[in-house]
Amino acid sequence: MSLPKSLLREVGAVATALLFALVIRTVAAEPFNVPSASMIPTLMVGDTLIAGKYTYGFSKYSAPFNLMPNFEGRILDKPPQRGDIVVFKLPRDTSINYVKRLIGMPGDKIQMREGRLYINGEIVPRTLTETTEFDLRGRNVTRYAETLPNGVTHAIYEQSDDALYDSTREFTVPDDSYFMMGDNRDDSLDSRASAESGGVGFVASEYLLGRVDRVMYSRDVDVGVWPLDALVESFRPERFFASVH
């Protein structure tokens, strides 16, 4: 028995819409949620980000649900820039997406010494901007403006200069790989910890998904969805479509 033409049209319309959405999320932009505090003060827990998928080109990880063919390298490859906020697949578990700031380029030597970032043997300047801020756990933190070698300036949080990853060995970033760090320096699991120890390690270019330039919307995830007035108040309108850098 053949299906009614009206039903076939409805199914075709739904399939077309799903295919269009999949293509958009693969080649243009895809939303990602921020689940942790590792990038505050730049990104907040509960931010929903828009990552430009076309910015760096495309790899086998670019399509949602692992729908891309299995191939090596990247198509239309465009190298990222130091200071970019990057969404990437966690190399040791590609079912997980991470968002960090790109600190180290291929060939760079990266080291933390007593809370200070060194790139290729040179200390990265930081300027004190605030000493009385509190992080999401109510801990006192110091806010600095850090300026990377290419001139990108961004905010970081430090609880102290002697935390777990505030002094490290010198890392040499391999070819076609990058070194990622969180802006919340003492509350971020990033490239300072190896993949073997449960960290991030170096991030090869094939794992890059896109660059974050904007927050789509944001809400306090500790607030439930009921009652309705609480849900409404949980949104952060000042972060809607806010640019980030």
Image (cartoon, rainbow, N blue to C red):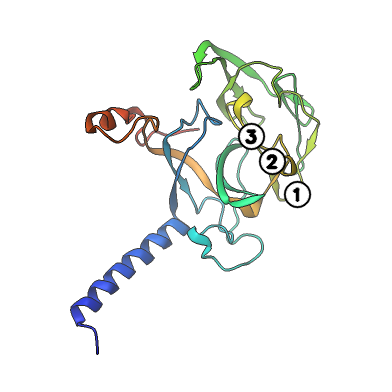
Label 3 and label 1: CA atoms lie apart by 22 Å
Residue beneath the point at 33% across and 70% down = 15
Quick one: which residue is furthest to the top in this view?
132
Residue at 44% in and 51% down = 29
In which quarter of the view is residue 112 placed? top right
Label 3: few (<14), some or many (≥20) within 10 Å? Answer: many
Label 2: which secondary element: loop
Task: Kindly report which numbered mark, 3 or 2, lies closer to the viewer in this rendering.
Answer: 2
Image position of 121 (left or right of 125): right
> Disc 3 designates what residue?
189
Q: Residues within 10 Å of mark 1 (few under 14, many from 20)?
A: few
Q: Position of residue 126 (x, y in %)?
A: 63, 19
Q: Which residue position is annotated with label 2?
A: 198
Q: CA distance from mark 1 to mark 2?
A: 22 Å
Task: Tell me where residue 131 appears, x and y as whole percent.
Answer: 55, 10
Write down the residue under mark 1.
175
For label 1, the SS is loop
Q: Amino acid at mark 2?
A: Gly
